[in-house]
Amino acid sequence: MEMNERKRHVILTAQQLFKDKGFANTSLQDIINQSNISKGTFYNYFSSKNEFFIAILEYVHEEESIRRDELLIGQDRANKQIFAEQISIRLQTNREYHLLPIFEAIFHSGDSDLKHFTKKHYLLELSWMKKRLIDIYGEQARPHASDGAVILYGMIQHIMHAWTAWSKVKVDIQKLMTFTLNRLDAVMNDLMQSKEVFLSDHILFSPIKDTYKQAHTKKQLLEQLLKFKQAVAKETKAENMQYINFIIEELEIDTPRLFVLKTVLQSFRQSFIGATNEIEARKLANNIWTFIHKEQR
């Protein structure tokens, strides 16, 4: 489902209504009225309310994925502080886009499509954590990284639930990350010394492999970039056009310089923030990042 600026406006309008009125008190008609569109137009954008929820979650997932990748540019992958900041991004975007009521609604909905979607992204998050734990603790941690990822995720989630039940003050995310990652040191060291394994080594890599299978080829990316370049040619700044041209030229090389591509990609995405074509630029950036990850395997 390709997202354009109007669809983005509907999503952002809904999120503001969730913030102002609460998720349970916001009707579909409220969203339609506030977005200044007809019900027919809404269903041209989204075939159902469920598809609308999925679009919101996909939109935010792309944003957090790109932010995480950008944090690692030029950094040591074993740096735990960077890892803490990357995890924090999900918690921050959940707050920023008011996603918790949506997750709760999905949990209680009983809808199989929505539950399948959230299950997929839950496994992708664990898969990402597992990969990062191997970066941090080394190859010797590989057999234990699935267990470590699930334990870390569980610590973060349950501490947050306990804090929310006890306090009206929002939890300090940075303190939470420091606390849980310090505990994780003990957990990972104990797992590696005892050589005890509960979840098998490959169990959380399947979602990542599926993502790689869906990665766009260089040819497809070049076609998307050329189409985007043509669409923005009359209204974009010269600097933005330079970033587009550089990425095109880099992808035309037999072996693109991935580090250079990452750096320019960050500037490209940021240069379109607030522009009419921001959504399309970010979608392109996300597609290119997926290609980069596949090439780095």
Image (cartoon, rainbow, N blue to C red):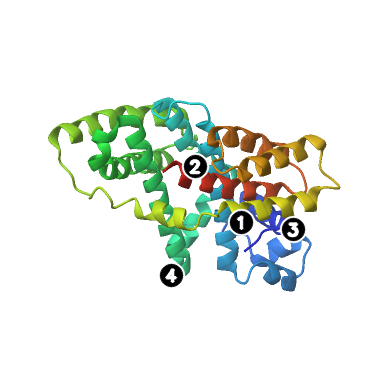
Q: Earlier in the sequence, mark 1 or mark 4?
A: 4
Q: Relative to residue 134, is residue 249 drawn left or right?
A: right
What number is the disc on residue 112?
4
Type of amino acid under label 1:
Gln
Residue 270 makes an appearance in the image: yes
Type of amino acid under label 3:
Arg
Type of amino acid under label 4:
Ser
Q: Earlier in the sequence, mark 1 or mark 2?
A: 2
Q: Which residue is mark 1?
A: 220
Crowd band around label 1 with a 10 angstrom C-alpha radius: few (<14), some (14–19), many (20+): few
Q: Which residue is mark 3?
A: 6
In the rendering, at what x and y percent does residue 48 appear? Answer: 60, 71
Picture quadrant of residue 11 = bottom right
Q: Which residue is mark 2?
A: 90
Mark 3 or mark 1: which is in front?
Answer: 1
In the rendering, at what x and y percent does residue 146 appear? Answer: 28, 45
Q: Residue at x 35, y 55 (%)?
A: 206
